[in-house]
Image (spheres, rainbow, N blue to C red):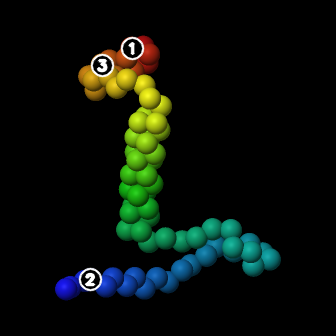
Amino acid sequence: MGFEVSMTIRQEQFVVDKEGNRIGVVLNIEDYHKLLADVEELESIRAFDEAKASGEKPIPFERAVAEIEAREK
């Protein structure tokens, strides 16, 4: 039986105000892009879950695109 252990060593950097309160964080660009990708994936999952829970009848993708394009005109 095998398994993989992954350990991430992080050096956290914060932006602080005059009083020393943390008001921001500094990320390296790779972590930033990974975070954005994860957020987009989570948004897609939530949208899918909401659509499934709505009980509405699904429509073909092409029709959905056509309806969206028609609204944008």
Crowdedness of circle 3 by 10 Å Cα count: few (<14), some, many (20+)? Answer: few
How far apart are the alpha carbons under marks 2 and 1?
Answer: 50 Å
Q: Is residue 18 above or below residue 47?
A: below
Residue 70 image label: 1
Q: Please indicate whether residue 72 sits to the left or right of residue 1 in the image.
A: right
Q: Is residue 8 above or below residue 68?
A: below
Crowdedness of circle 1 by 10 Å Cα count: few (<14), some, many (20+)? Answer: few
Give the mark nearer the N terminus: 3 vs 2: 2
- Give the residue at mark 3: 63
The quarter in which the C terminus is drawn is top left
Residue 12 image label: none
How far apart are the alpha carbons under marks 3 and 2?
Answer: 44 Å
Question: Foreground: 49 or 27?
Answer: 49
Three-letter amino acid code at the position of disc 1: Ala
Three-letter amino acid code at the position of disc 2: Glu
Mark 2, secondary structure of its residue: loop
Q: How many marks?
A: 3
Query: For the point 43% across and 34% down, which residue is it?
Result: 51
Q: Please indicate whether residue 50 sits to the left or right of residue 22 in the image.
A: left
Q: What x and y, as percent, mark residue 4?
A: 26, 83
Give the mark nearer the N terminus: 2 vs 1: 2
Query: For the point 78% across and 75% down, which residue is it?
Result: 18
The quarter in which the N terminus is drawn is bottom left
- Give the residue at mark 2: 4
Query: For the point 25% across and 83% down, which residue is it?
Result: 3
Mark 3, secondary structure of its residue: helix
The image quadrant of residue 33 is bottom left
Q: Is residue 72 visible?
A: yes
Q: Is residue 63 above or below residue 52?
A: above
Tag nearer the camera, 2 or 1: 2
Q: Is residue 29 visible?
A: no
